[in-house]
Amino acid sequence: MFDANKLLQQFLGPSASNSVLQTGSAAKQQLGSMGLGGFGGGAVAGGLLGMVLGGKKMKKMSKGVLGYGGAAAAGALAYKAYTNWQQGKAAATAPVASPADFGQVERSFLPEANAAANGQPFPLALIQAMIGAAKADGHIDAVEQRALFEKVEQMGLDAESKAFVFDAINRPADIATIAASARGIEQATELYLVSRMAIDVDEPSERAYLEALSHRLNLPAELIAHLDRQVEAAP
């Protein structure tokens, strides 16, 4: 089996992705030294996710969480939303995760902590969720798909990794399968969060996709509001 964590790092881009795969003081030290500027959209744009989203969507979303750290911070942002929800805070005014929080993430919220419900590494489920969400508007045409394949070829992936990514891009988004990959509420929150990052909620088709996914994940409405808050209010 190929290295799922490494593929997630390459998918997300160079610097931002490494941080979420660390725990404790090492993560806090790295994230603190990077500062908010270090979570620039450049890391995401430099990875495959940026190409899947497309230039227009990346530009529109750069002021949100993609500019803050993108899906690389999924575990930390999901954990912050979860703890805010558990503590009964109002979603509209709940605190947003900062680099100082990223070294204090409960291990169960880290992508590599547990396998997905289907037995595959959970980082792969996150990749599938992001690709599925990014394709919700149907914007990937044959030319863009060819460019994506060329980008994958240039990433130096092994044959198994390339096959996984090619299949995920080619295959129609399957909300039921994506939702079924969640093992517990921790993974469900992360799948929703990374999908929300790759969605333009102003587009009806994409909003409908996200609502269908949240229904399948069976997340409480109040928790979804907290997850939305983390995505929308990131500094």
Image (tube, helix red, strand yellow):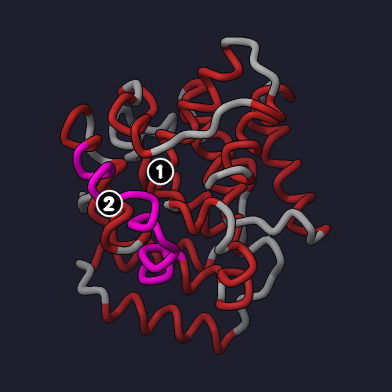
In the image, 28 versus 119, the foreground residue is: 28
Going by the numbered disc 1, the residue's amino acid type is Ala
Badge number at residue 73: 1
Labels in figure, total: 2
Say if 26 sits above or below 204 in the image: above
In the image, 205 versus 16, the foreground residue is: 16
Name the residue that disc number 2 marks: 34
Q: Position of residue 221 (x, y in %)?
A: 74, 25
Q: Determine the image quadrant of residue 222.
A: top right
Q: Which residue is drawn at 39% across and 68% down?
A: 42
| Residue most extreme to the left | 26
Q: Is the magenta stretch mostly helix, strand or loop?
A: helix
Is 30 magenta? The answer is: yes
Say if 141 sits above or below 176 in the image: below
- The kind of secondary structure element at disc 1 is helix
Q: Position of residue 188 (x, y in %)?
A: 54, 30
